[in-house]
Image (cartoon, rainbow, N blue to C red):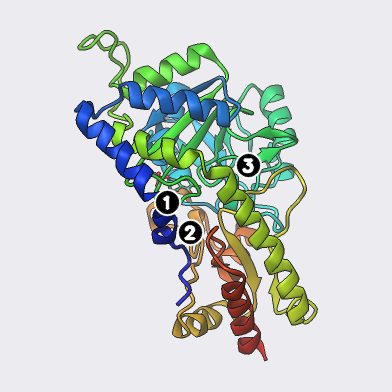
Amino acid sequence: MIPLLDLQAQYEGIRAEILAAVNRVLESQQFILGPEVEAFESEIAAYCQAPYAIGVSSGSDALLAALMALDVGPGDEVITTPYSFFATAGAAARLGARPVFVDIEPRAYNIDPELVEAAITPRTRAILPVHLYGQAAHLAPLLEIAARRGLALIEDAAQAIGAEYQGRRVGALGTVGCFSFFPSKNLGAYGDAGLLTCADAALAERLRLLRVHGAAPKYHHRLVGGNFRLDALQAAVLRVKLKYLDDWTEARRQNAARYRRLFEESGLLASGAVGLPEDLGYGRHIYHQYVLRVQRRDELQAFLKARQIGTEVYYPVPLHLQECFRNLGYAHGDFPEAERAAAETLAIPIYPELSEVQQEEVVARIAEFYA
Ligand SMILES: *Cc1c(COP(=O)(O)O)cnc(C)c1O
């Protein structure tokens, strides 16, 4: 069996350190924020090359708090991609703002900067690109548009911890960055957790306030925020894992290079049956997912499942076609590249502990399917 992700294998290598870290928190009996969270924040800020890092309860709450900090609300519009996890657009909708979708460019699956300007209206408040699958969105043109039009740029970096764009880590390149430590992310907690990054001191202060119901001091509420706090237990786990993150990322990158060689040798690329993820050369791609573009996707997935090879479709229904967004008035055909990606892509295992033999097996089975 080759799972899509093997967190057990990762745990084997760090068990003693994790248990010691968890025990340290239990002995301290300090479970919410506190020194463990502060230590994590300063370590992860350095890792992300961000002046400020604020630990929060999840990636979804990071997005929500970022939009709240920027006063996005009813009547406002947020330009984003229709091809992402739901939380990206859901955060805007939860605040009464309207997600305005712009199609992706088909090679990296990220928002197409050339289509953004036409979507701006007097109500637009922010551009919200996603660094999907671990590759940075093309930020330079987006930052230029945001600056010229007076818009915030919020990075959904949930899948991109440690990814780089033109030599700099994602997350603090725009106004604010949002990360997720959902267990299956490249840096995964043992439960829900997330992070905000930014370069502006006043914004960081606002985000810290929003995290604790806007209270400073306690019981004196300057803003209406929420409970967006990071648990000390999760911070302790993340501090252990952060030390290994670059090794894990390097292993993912090596696995990606090996897949490229194996797929080339298989003849599947020449025949056009399979397309590989493209690294557009903006900077370090961290391969959160390794996503193929394939013919007869659903049949291939069933074939691999029957042979105990784990795969996943990210994401089968683009956001503009979700039932809960029917009120936005979008229709089939509005974003052809996102719709094509939703129909043609399949993620295969890329996790760091994946062996060469396992990769050969995955490619051999795919070749068997198309033979
Ligand atoms: C995982 C993810 C989120 C949400 O993170 P949670 O921690 O699960 O709330 C948001 N955006 C993207 C692109 C994600 O992949």
From the viewer's side, name the closer residue of 197 and 114.
197
Kind of residue at badge 1: Phe
73 vs 230, left or right, is right
Name the residue rendered at 42%, 39% in the picture: 240
Cβ at disc 3 under 8 Å from ligand 1: no
Give the class, few, some or many, for how many residues have Cα within 10 Å of label 1's Cα (few <14, many ≥20): some
Q: What's the CA distance linking mark 2 and mark 1?
A: 7 Å
Please indicate, yes or no, whether residue 73 appears anywhere in the rendered image.
no
Q: What residue does disc 3 label?
A: 163
Name the residue rendered at 61%, 27% in the picture: 49
Kind of residue at badge 2: Leu
Residue 5 in the image: state x and y as whole percent: 46, 62
- Helix, strand or loop at mark 2: helix
Above-or-below relation of 16 to 27: below
* Circle 3 or circle 2, nearest the eye: 3
Q: Residue furthest right?
A: 270
Q: State yes or no: discs 2 and 1 in contact (Cβ < 8 Å).
A: yes
Q: Residue furthest bottom?
A: 371
Q: What residue does disc 2 label?
A: 321
Q: What's the CA distance linking mark 1 and mark 3?
A: 31 Å
Give the class, few, some or many, for how many residues have Cα within 10 Å of label 3's Cα (few <14, many ≥20): many
Above-or-below relation of 352 to 171: below
Which image quarter is the N terminus in? bottom left
Which image quarter is the C terminus in? bottom right
Residue 15 in the image: state x and y as whole percent: 36, 50
Q: Which of marks 1 and 3 is nearer the N terminus?
A: 3
